[in-house]
Amino acid sequence: MNNNSSNMMALAPNTSNKRETVCIFGTGDFGRALGHKMIQSGYPVVYGSRSTQISNLIPKDAEVLSHAEAAQKAAIIIIAIQRQHYNFLIPLAESLHGKVLVDISNNLKLNQYPESNAEYLAQLLPGAKVVKAFNTVSAWALQSGTLDASRQVFVCGDDMEAKQMVMNIVRALGLTPLDQGSLLAAQGIENYPLQLFPMWKFPILLSFGLGVFFFFYCLALSVIYTYVYEKQDFSFFIAITIPNQVCPVMALVLLALVYLPGILAAIIQLYRGTKYRRFPDWLDKWMLCRKQLGLIALAFASLHVLFTLVTPIRSYVRWRTSVGIISQAQNNNTEPLDNTNAWLSDSYLALGILGFFLFVLLGITSLPSVSNSVNWREFRFVQSKLGYLTLILCTAHTLIYGGKWFLNPLAYKWYLPDIYMLSLIVPCIVLVVKFVLVFPCVDKPLTQIRQGWERTPKYSE
Ligand code: NAP
């Protein structure tokens, strides 16, 4: 669903004090909540119901009439009734001719019917002007006034004038109409409230899978291996040591996975010599959830920072430090300062701090309120250039951490590389291929392809 701010209609002040009567078919939860809100906003409301008896639940100032009588009183009729009952409207076709019918219905499943409910309503009553609206607002939110998160109302319809009338009502209720175009958009609008974090599913599943794999990998090498070969119980590593190994690895791998699809897309475009052929579906989906992958990576990086900050107060670390000091005292020797080690340790920390700082900056610029205030070039600069810089810094941070161990056989317990070595595979591949892609001999044809040039044009003159 495109809720781009460019579609957002500016709030226009309503100059007229007198509002036109609005008719609502159905005195159920939504009909009552919407009627209540409309009366508060100054609209006279008349209900069309199967029963004209006034109940306590119905807003005090509203009239309740039969459907046919109520329809005569207003130009706009809101159908607050489930789709499966729409057939009752057919005998009312004459009274509803030329009226604006607002379909607010939702379904229980995605794409439950072959056509949207609004299109179905338009088919049943071809003489009416059907507009889809309000389905993303809940009765509870309308009634309780807690509309902060859902002020946006998607509106679509084939009749421009009818759509404008409905959007005026939406604005008068203090909500923001988003014009989604013709009635063809209704299916998407009806599917919208049924989606459960659609863009987050793949990143969360991937992170969960990778996280579990890395956790057990560390458990095997840090706890089980030590127990089997050295008879030492380091099971307490599960609380901080292992999470502090898994979190940075996850952060780095996920950050690299944000940039990998762009690299693959570039390779595919270079191979095909055109940008006019669709990418495989999996790559399209991957590219669409890069922001979510990046935000999860940032969450892991933040956890890594927190776990690292508590290191000095851990009893295991304090014990190791004091054992080291006591053994130096007992042997009456002081280890000299190793300058190389000091350099490595400080560079490792500095790269980590800078990498995390840029990571946070990337996260902040991905927030809609920030990304909406920068232009496309600025956004690309931050997300692409600063993003790659973050990846370089974080990869260097990891390389310095374990670089000297790469060639040491002791680092390969059970012939397996340590986890930080695994974590470097994807980032290094991404950085090396990106390095190749920026060479002029590769970058030039790629830029031309992205500007529309084709190696073998499909439509030659
Ligand atoms: P509801 O409480 O079940 O009310 C539906 C109303 O439809 C009934 O009160 C009844 O009104 C009327 N009705 C029921 N059977 C009928 C029939 N056979 N013929 C004619 N009218 C009939 O449902 P609701 O929660 O208000 O939802 C109404 C519509 O709004 C649905 O399409 C729903 O998808 C949509 N919606 C609801 C919400 C929400 O938060 N509830 C949010 C967005 C959209 P009378 O007794 O007055 O005739």
Image: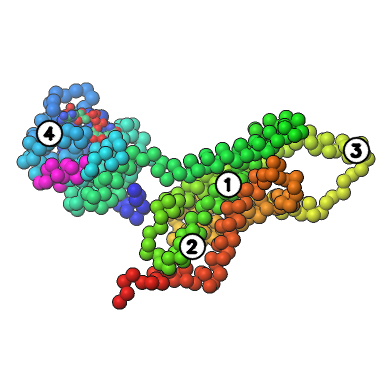
- Front position in the image: 232 or 448: 232
Q: Magenta segment range?
A: 117-129
SS at mark 4 in the image = helix
Q: Residue beneath label 2, please?
A: 267
**Quarter of the displayed picture in which ligand 1 can be seen:** top left
- Check if mark 2's residue and mark 3's residue have beta carbons within 8 Å: no
Q: Is mark 4 within 8 Å of ligand 1?
A: yes
Q: Nearer the viewer, mark 2 or mark 3?
A: 2
Side (left or right) of 92 relative to 323 = left
Q: What separation in Å lies between label 2 and label 3 (alpha carbons)?
A: 60 Å
Decide whether the magenta segment is chiefly helix, strand or loop: helix
Image quarter (top left, top right, bottom left or bottom right) of the C terminus: bottom left
Q: Residues within 10 Å of mark 4 (few under 14, many from 20)?
A: few
**At label 2, which amino acid type do we have?**
Ile
Tell me the CA gap for discs 2 and 1: 25 Å
Q: Is residue 85 magenta?
A: no
Residue 288 visible to an observer of this rendering: no
Residue 239 in the image, given as x and y percentages of width and height: 65, 32
Q: Is residue 83 left or right of residue 73?
A: right
Query: Which of the two residues, 66 or 192, is positioned nearer the viewer here?
Result: 192
In front: label 2 or label 4: 2
Q: Is residue 322 above or below residue 97?
A: above
Q: Is residue 124 magenta?
A: yes
Q: Mark 2: few, some, or many residues within 10 Å (few <14, many ≥20)?
A: some
Q: Which residue is mark 1?
A: 251
The answer to the question of whether label 4 and label 1 lie on touching residues, with beta carbons closer than 8 A, is no
Q: CA distance from mark 2 to mark 4?
A: 58 Å
For mark 3, what is the residue? 329
Name the secondary structure under disc 1: helix
